[in-house]
Image (spheres, grey):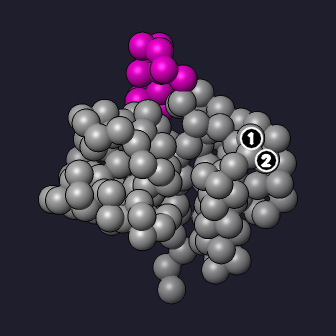
Amino acid sequence: MRRLTVVQLLPALHSGGVERSTLEIAQALVEAGHRAIVVSAGGRLVQPLLDLGAEHLALDIGRKSLLTLRHVASLRRLFAETGADIVHARSRLPAWLGWHALRGLPRERRPRWVTTMHGLNSPGRYSAIMASGERVICVSMTVRDYLLGHYPHT
């Protein structure tokens, strides 16, 4: 089996369901012999993540500011330099940044794009990014029904 590199994108690693499931996925990847990288602004769960054998890159990709757009180039470079196989976005703003970073890579070298919908975000263009994954993970049937009701093309 080929070792995969999976990059997860989320705003921060403080506490909550998004953060816990990020650590669970990272742990499963590492235990299966893959490389798990998490990009976030950091937080109290960084050390537990590192203790699992995963890697962390501190980028403030959840801050709603025009300055956050500067991280698109950093993400693109990360995806290229690590040979990322999968980019997994778990929140809207990090998803937009990741999506733009991917679009700047040659199609044949682009990682696969996965998103996870954790909640019932207000429908619209900004939230639609969470339905853009080649694979979209929904954390519950309620979220799945909501997603399919508002984004039937998913």
Position of residue 58 in the picture relative to residue 102 (left or right) = right
- Residue hosting label 1: 14
Near-viewer residue (52 or 76): 52
Q: Is residue 49 above or below residue 124?
A: below
Q: Amino acid at mark 1?
A: His
Residue 144 % position (x, y): 36, 65
Rendered residue at 42%/13% (across/down): 66
Q: Secondary structure at mark 1?
A: loop
**Are dots 2 and 1 in contact, CB under 8 Å?**
yes
Q: Is residue 69 magenta?
A: yes
User: In terms of image quadrants, where is residue 104?
Assistant: top left
Residue 97 % position (x, y): 40, 34
- Which label sits on residue 45? 2
Which stretch did the figure color magenta?
63-76
Q: Extreme left residue here?
A: 153
Mark 2 crowd level (few <14, some 14–19, many ≥20, 10 Å Cα): some
Q: Extreme bottom residue here?
A: 1
Is residue 117 visible in the rendered image? The answer is yes
Q: Secondary structure at mark 2?
A: loop
- Which label sits on residue 118? none
| Placement of the C terminus among the 4 image quadrants | bottom left
User: In terms of image quadrants, where is residue 138?
Assistant: bottom left
